[in-house]
Image: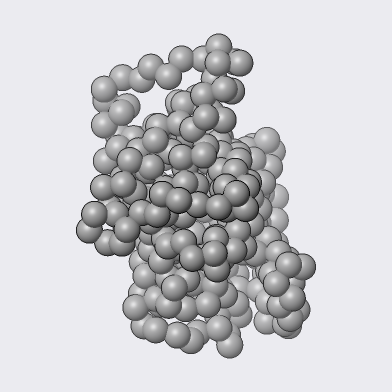
């Protein structure tokens, strides 16, 4: 339990860094498709080297490959496109606040579709999360309604991704193998999607390559830690513990983007920490 909790908390913290890097890449003229393509492409050589070093095999069954493509990768890809794309219409504060409603969506799906029962700790944590997200949203809701809808939908697709990782038992795969296939499928999908949504830019600068390497390594560790944590904890606890992500985003915004330390964000972060403590203390 403890190891799984730490893994998910660290995964959320790593994901909290990605909006900062993504915004730097957008400022350099890249679009959503290009950012997501190179983000996962640069992960692949690192994974292959690690797999060779650890003498692991990339072989998986046809059934596992099918699940990875249609049940795990699809909601993950949609989440990346929706959330990263929403940054073009609304500010990152609005987008991330709406996206971080996914723990509530996970729990609602578990209750209504999988008929799982909730204990008092989970219910208390959900209430605190809803209040916390409301505090984060205060003063942030602005911009185009398209961006707001995209960010809100990303919370649903990410909730589906979290559940599918557990329900399809994709979390039983070795973390490096899981990350390899998810990254490979995502990269290929970005090429296909580029023919219909927006072009894929092949030429990138040295500075952008450096950022993609950092983003790739961050993504690899975040994916692996979350998948391992999911195996230990289950989807509901994973969704709640991964809320270390918005706290990291607040800290990163203050340090690197000179954002103001607002009272609503402080209170929201405190409520998230309390929610995390409630669900972990019970175990």
The front one of 116 and 52 is 52
Q: Position of residue 255 (x, y in %)?
A: 77, 68
**Residue 270 falls in image quadrant:** bottom right
Which quadrant is home to the N terminus? top right
Residue 210 appears in view: yes
Query: Of all residues shown, which one is farthest toward the left?
Result: 196
Residue 281 left/right relative to 182: right
Which quadrant is home to the C terminus? top right
Q: Position of residue 4 (x, y in %)?
A: 62, 38
Q: Position of residue 186 (x, y in %)?
A: 37, 43
Q: Position of residue 67 (x, y in %)?
A: 30, 34
Count all numbered tags in the image, as a single digit: 0
**Figure check: 46 above or below 230:** above
Residue 164 appears in view: no
Q: How is the image coloured?
A: one colour
Q: Residue at x 34, y 49 (%)?
A: 190
Q: Residue at x 32, y 58 (%)?
A: 199
Q: Residue at x 47, y 46 (%)?
A: 38
The front one of 51 and 281 is 51
Residue 136 left/right relative to 195: right
The front one of 77 and 165 is 77
Q: Residue at x 26, y 31 (%)?
A: 66
């Amino acid at each position: 339990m403890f190891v799984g909790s730490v893994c998910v908390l660290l995964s959320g913290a790593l994901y909290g860094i990605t909006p900062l890097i993504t915004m730097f890449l957008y400022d350099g003229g890249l679009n959503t498709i290009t950012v997501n393509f190179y983000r996962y492409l640069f992960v692949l050589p690192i994974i292959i080297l690690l797999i060779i070093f650890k003498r692991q095999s990339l072989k998986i069954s046809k059934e596992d490959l099918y699940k990875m493509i249609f049940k795990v990768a699809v909601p993950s890809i949609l989440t990346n496109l929706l959330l990263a794309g929403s940054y073009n219409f609304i500010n990152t504060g609005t987008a991330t606040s709406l996206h971080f409603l996914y723990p509530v969506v996970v729990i609602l799906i578990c209750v209504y579709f999988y008929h799982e029962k909730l204990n008092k700790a989970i219910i208390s944590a959900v209430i605190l999360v809803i209040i916390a997200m409301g505090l984060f949203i205060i003063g942030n809701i602005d911009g185009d309604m398209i961006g707001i809808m995209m960010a809100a939908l990303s919370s649903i697709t990410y909730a589906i991704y979290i559940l599918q990782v557990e329900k399809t038992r994709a979390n039983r795969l070795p973390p490096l193998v899981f990350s390899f296939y998810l990254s490979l499928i995502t990269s290929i999908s970005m090429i296909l999607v580029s023919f219909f949504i927006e072009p894929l830019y092949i030429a990138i600068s040295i500075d952008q390559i450096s950022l993609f390497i950092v983003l790739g390594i961050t993504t690899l560790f975040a994916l692996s830690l979350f998948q391992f944590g999911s195996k230990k904890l289950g989807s509901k606890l994973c969704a709640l513990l991964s809320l270390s992500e918005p706290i990291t985003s607040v800290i990163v915004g203050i340090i690197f983007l000179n954002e103001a330390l607002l009272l609503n964000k402080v209170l929201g972060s405190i409520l998230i920490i309390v929610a995390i403590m409630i669900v972990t203390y019970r175990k």
